[in-house]
Amino acid sequence: MRWACILFPQLALDDVLRRRADRDAPLVLVDPAQSRPLVRAANRRACAAGVKVGQSLATARALCERLAIADYDNAAADRCRELLAAWAYSYSSLVSRDFPDALLLEVEASFRLFGGWPNLQARLRLELDELGFRHRIALAPNPHAARVLAGLHDGIAIPETRLCNALGTLPVEHAGLAPECALGLRRMGLRRLDQVLCLPRAALGRRIGEEALAHLGRLTGELAAPLAFYRPPDAFDARIELPFHTASSESLLFPLRRLVRDFAAFLAGRDGGVARFRLTFEHEHDARTRVLVGLLAPERDPELLFDIARERLDRIRLCAPVCALRLQADELPPFAPARRNLFDPRPQQAEPWQALRERLRARLGEEAVHGIALHADHRPERAWQIEHGKQRADAPPRNPRPAWLLHRPIPLRPAVRRILAGPERIESGWWDGEDVRRDYYVVETGAGQRAWVFRPAGETGAFMLHGWFA
Amino acid sequence: MSDAALQSLFERGRLWRGQGRALPRSTLPTGFAALDAALPGGGWPAAALSEILLPADGVGEWQLLWPLLARLSAQDGRIVLVAPPYIPFAPAWAAAGIALPQLQVVQTEDDRNAMWVAEQCLRSAACAAVVCWPRQGDPRTLRRLQLAAETGQCQGFALRPAQVADQPSMAALRILLEVDPPQWRVLKCRGGNPPARAIVPSPFSGGRGPAHGAGGMLLHADLADQKPSPSIALPARSLRPALRVEGESQAAS
């Protein structure tokens, strides 16, 4: 087995940066619980201005103009790890979150699918960049070695045979041992891990303790190290708190896009789609605007989901400034990608009908796109029906029927030149209260139009226009 | 300009000789021999916008379009009606041979949305034919539709009132439907000169759709042959058993 360790050195900071449109503005994270706030993390611009982790916030403010400040939120970082685990699940069935700030993936089983480690690694990095997380990746034969190596060398890949050499060159401080233990070893004159590993184990154990000895055993692979593996949840629920309150749908697009992208990454990891999700815009004083987005078929393409969500957002009227955004989905049906022929002659930018239909429905409303179907009834109003799903084939009636039916009959205004066919009596519906007794004619009007008209059965009054033979 | 470049212009119908070789045969015959003969490609211009100008409601635009739509729908092509002015009456469409599962209707609230939908549908390549009813005769809109039809390799049809016949248009083909007498006048056809004489619609040059496709379409021609009927009580010609007493029989039983 080969284990890839993806280390997220600044998970909490990345999580805040991801939600900001301007990632280069100086930003620090401070611990909200403390009375005298200390800087817990600082982005590159803030560091360049001289801000250091551990400084007081007042110092950092003095050093850097226009410093943005956000809370260091452990819960948010946990949610990020949850999301990243869901994302990583698309690359490996064995994903572990046992290490803080890192994900462990068993990847050897996925090499054939993704074309070897270099391709897989490139793909992981690309997608992490898109998701907005800084990362370090290392590959090693066991999870603990991978974790230790990722801290030192970004991008390193160690095969089984060279593991001992690679571990041997590690300084003792960076071998994942407890700081006092590493200090003790250094005071003994042991600077590199190979010097430690060649010592007799029993004697070493008495000096540095059982726990440190077990850690060394796990690093070299001598001790088995069982991990707890990630199981993807069956529902998605993510929330973004906005740094500023806004009622303009324009400025909600950025957090919305972020949310939908995360959602799509989650769906792809689960190999599922979504047919129904809820967007909640939270206002102050616990007020909420809810938008239910329903699709006809499960989808998971991030662009399509975003387009649909954006159209919905454009159509609603936000009553108050929004302070948070939440996306929830409970039903996650399996996703069947649209089938395309290999030699499909259609042009490059072709969009499957399902995707097009969803875009149209998102903009125009749920009922805007529909099919039509026959319905076995003699009354013209009921001889057709709106159809949203699959249709069954019925035999069409044998009498002439017009291409256009009016929404409701109106008095025929143009003069009738001649009657072409009729009368055809349609008498039906006495049992459901919409009784119809009419004589239908096909007439030609003075202007040469062909109309389908009727009048009450047996009468000779004026015609009612009900359709056009177009 | 090189020969090859000229040739490609000829093939796309951008350039034509006054007298000379015809365009490559269109793959979309109209279903009417006289009209096919009058059009430069021998049929509808492929992947283009065609404009049909109507003097009034109920003058036979579907008689003209149904043969093509029936064939496209039989080949699993999707047909989209964007904001139709009336309800497409399913029995007639089924009788005309249109595969109803392939027919989709998009309802919109205003003309702007309708044009947006038409453009999206044309461009997406998910549809075989898109029929729309542009109310404002904005040349830019038609130009966009024409470009979208080219991009999406889709048949676009714009059904517009006859009053706009003298406005310039980007459409590859413009046909004016005349009612008295019923005839079709080609106002413009890309790749050739429009025929001087109007075409009298005659049913079918062959290649009609499914067998039951005749009912609705023949009506126009059938009835046109009829003499005016003097009386209302007597049907001019009993096309099919005209009187339906099914409701009464149920009431009696």
Image: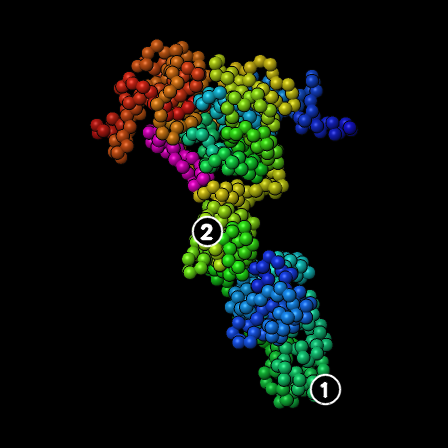
Quadrant occupied by the N terminus of chain B:
top right
Instruction: Name above or below for residue B196 compared with residue A134.
Output: above
Report how far apart the C-alphas of labels 1 and 2 lie in the structure: 67 Å
Under mark 1, the amino acid is Gly
Under mark 2, the amino acid is Leu
**Residue positioned 36% across, 21% down in the render:** A412
Image position of B86 (left or right of B9): left
| In the rendered image, residues at marks 1 and 2 fall on the same chain | yes
Quadrant occupied by the C terminus of chain B:
top left
Q: Secondary structure at mark 2?
A: loop
Residue A318: which disc?
2
Image position of B94 (left or right of A267): left
Residue B38: which disc?
none
Instruction: Name above or below for residue A76 compared with residue A450.
Output: below
A358, B248: nearer the viewer? A358
Rendering quarter of residue A398: top left
The magenta region covers: A367-390
Residue A189: which disc?
1
